[in-house]
Image (cartoon, helix red, strand yellow):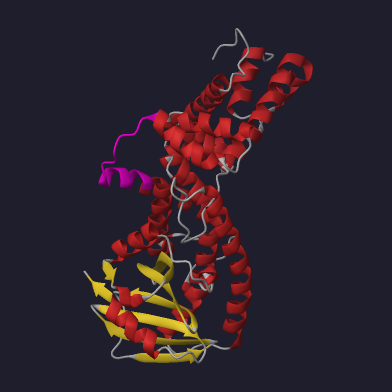
Amino acid sequence: MTMDCLQFRRIAGADPRQLDAAAQSHAEGCPGCAEHLRQLRALDACILAALEVPVPAPGVAVASPAAPVARLDRRRWFALAASILGGVLVGTLLWVGGPRNSLARDLIEHLGHEPEALVVTQRPEDERVLGKVLERAGIRLRPEMGTVSYANTCVFRGRRVPHLVVQTDGGPVTVMVLRNERPAGPERFDEQGFAGRIVPAGPGSIAVIGAAEADLGPVTTDVLAAVEWL
Amino acid sequence: MNAPLAGKDGEAAFTRLCHELRPDLYRFAFWLARDRSVAEDVVQEALLRAWVSRNSLAEAGAAKPWLLTIVRREHARLYERKRHDTVSVDELVESESAELAAAAEQETTDVRRAILALEDDYREPLVLQVLLGLSTQEIAGQLGLTQAAVLTRLFRARHKLRRALGTVADGETE
């Protein structure tokens, strides 16, 4: 039994890319349906273009009437450029040698996933983004914290933790508030190009990580004073 | 894509997979929720659940449909947990399409508006097919429908879009 035009259009309208032999044969012998198929495929190309909405980089605020798309695009390009540079840097540093402490190792590995965070900037993170990250973590920040240039809720060791970056005179410093990681006492590490401190605080600990040989004492003190556990 | 995901190496492979698939997951979540902020929340929660359950994923090749299912469930769960304010479709289309329009051509913007206005039953299988490349059989599995029902919804989705875009010929019936 041959296929009629109505049957063909129902089949093509459901999936214009995958026609069976009978439908293909009908289109070859029917100029009207061939044109209909061409239009459906053109529509599908438009649908695909429409569905491919911009994907925000992790930690980058979505655009809103108060934050125009153009600004988002600049930030995304900046984040992309920083990702490439940061990825090369972090990858090289990770290749040089392995850290002793497994929590430290996991923290350094985590930084490799978000190299765009380690950008020197005086631009503070969007207040709504920062507020959301802090709310999720159940913490507040006092002014002692300084300029937070990056805030994201990250999955770390199977839990959601706030990943913040604070701008200091010595460059950007990463702060991760680890409610569920409680070390026996303060720990330090200086490996793979990173210096870090993990300090018991609240119910868990706070990790402060900067560039190798950075003096993290003052910023660690400020961070410990600034984080308020709710 | 079929590497095992067990052990420490498996954790790293799983993390890489999540990074690779994040754009698809975000876009799927966006077209489910039609809200970029909600989409980000859904993807974050879904990835957290995926991380916790990663041992139940036997091989990387199965990751995409597995993660899409988690995103879909997380989206449904979000709406069970929270009673979101009711927003009319017209308002939603106006707000989201206006935000997305800045970087898009007029034709893309028009199609996007039409997709935003489609009912969930028609929008979701269309997204799964056109954007995520799933077969009719895979879509039927995701949505718990027969393949015939999926084909009907896909046909109607395109017909509604053509009608909204003014490209349905006179006398053409559904």
Is residue B51 shown left or right of residue B83?
right
Magenta region includes residue B83: yes
Q: Quadrant of residue A26?
A: top right
Give the quarter of the figure containing the N terminus of chain B: bottom right
**The C terminus of chain B, quarter of image:** top right
Q: Work out whether residue B45 or residue B70 is closer to the camera in this orientation and state it.
A: B45
- Magenta stretch: includes residue B162: no
Looking at the image, residue A39 sits to the left or right of residue A213; the answer is: right
Q: Is residue A91 above or below residue B14?
A: below
Tally the numbered discs: 0
> In x, y percent, where is residue B103?
60, 43
Residue B116: horizontal and vertical position, in percent? 48, 33
The image position of residue B59, as x and y in percent, is 52, 60
Q: Please name the residue shown 46% across and 61% down the image.
A: A59
Answer with left or right where residue A187 lies relative to residue A191: left
Above or below residue A215? Residue A147 is: above
Instruction: Tell which residue pokes out farthest to the left in this image.
Output: A230
Q: Is residue B170 left or right of residue B43?
A: right
Answer above or below: position of A58 versus A40: below
Residue at x 52% of width, y 70% of height: A113
In the image, which residues are magenta?
Answer: B75-89
Please name the residue shown 68% across and 29% down the image.
Answer: A41
Any part of residue B59 in sight: no
Whether residue A27 appears in this view of the structure is yes
Q: Nearer the viewer, residue B62 or A164?
A: A164
Q: Residue at x 49, y 45 (%)?
A: B28
Q: Find the residue positioned furthest to the top.
A: B171
Image coords of residue A67 (percent x, y): 47, 51
* Closest to the observer, A29 or A67: A67
